[in-house]
Image (cartoon, rainbow, N blue to C red):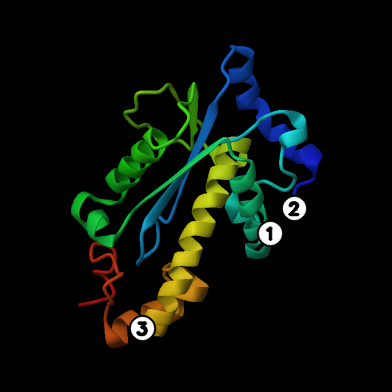
Amino acid sequence: MARTKHDTLTMLEYEKQCLEKGQKYIAGVDEVGRGPLAGPVVVASVIMPLAEEDIIQGVNDSKKVSEKNREILYQKIISKAIACSIEWADEKVIDEINILQATKLCMKKAIEGLSVAPDTVLIDAVKIDCKYPILPIIKGDAKSYSIACASIVAKVVRDRYMTEMDVKYPEYGFASNKGYGSSKHIEALKTIGPCPLHRKSFIKNFCQ
């Protein structure tokens, strides 16, 4: 069930704390795709306007929003954002430096890629080295409006890419599983082996 506007406004606690300190630009950062067997990890960083009339109804943790509503919210977020930056690391980078380091690298790049310098960065429970002040929030995508907006942007970007890759590699069901380990996906790995999108470090148990 989508959040009402009143519910969405309750996700502004951390943003309000920053605003009360005189800070103007608060960035939210989140990643999507740490767990899949194939495809990139995608990070989005956004700075949203935080006046009550600018708050987008229905924004929530991307995992709690339907695909149809995510697409609608994505367009609203992109059109309203003061600044937005997207970075990703593909399967080769993930295999080379591991998924956690790949995620942190993308987060750092996404933050530093913003066209407006943030006064504070709200991030979903990951500690990274950054030239801007960082506030990690456990389960931040469900608690912070800015992080939730970033979560939706990253999710839509990654899902669109994996759906495109389904046309190229239809055997694995990427359009439906987005690279996660569904039964169809795992069965395909066992019977026909991996495609170039697969993370070799993630599929060792399925490809002997």
x, y (%) of residue 164?
Answer: 45, 73
- Above-or-below relation of 194 to 65: below
Q: Disc 3 or disc 1, which is closer to the eye?
A: 1
The circle on residue 2 is 2
x, y (%) of residue 178?
Answer: 46, 68
Which residue position holds label 1?
A: 69
x, y (%) of residue 159?
Answer: 50, 64
Query: Closest to the observer: 105 or 206?
Result: 105
Q: Is residue 49 left or right of residue 200?
A: right
- Above-or-below relation of 138 to 133: below
Residue under the point 52% across and 32% down: 27
Between the C-alphas of marks 1 and 2, the distance is 8 Å
Q: Disc 1 or disc 2, which is closer to the eye?
A: 1
- The amino acid sitting under disc 3 is Ala
- Please, which residue is most extreme toward the bottom here? 191
- The amino acid sitting under disc 2 is Ala
Count of numbered labels shown in the rendering:
3
Residue under the point 26% across and 73% down: 196
Q: Is residue 97 left or right of residue 172?
A: left
Which residue position holds label 3?
A: 188
Q: Is residue 79 left or right of residue 121?
A: right
Provide the secondary structure element on which disc 2 rests: loop
Provide the secondary structure element on which disc 1 rests: helix
State yes or no: discs 1 and 2 in contact (Cβ < 8 Å): yes
- Above-or-below relation of 5 to 137: below
Between the C-alphas of marks 3 and 1, the distance is 30 Å
Residue under the point 45% across and 26% down: 117
Q: Which of the marked residues, 2 or 3, is nearer the chain's N terminus?
A: 2
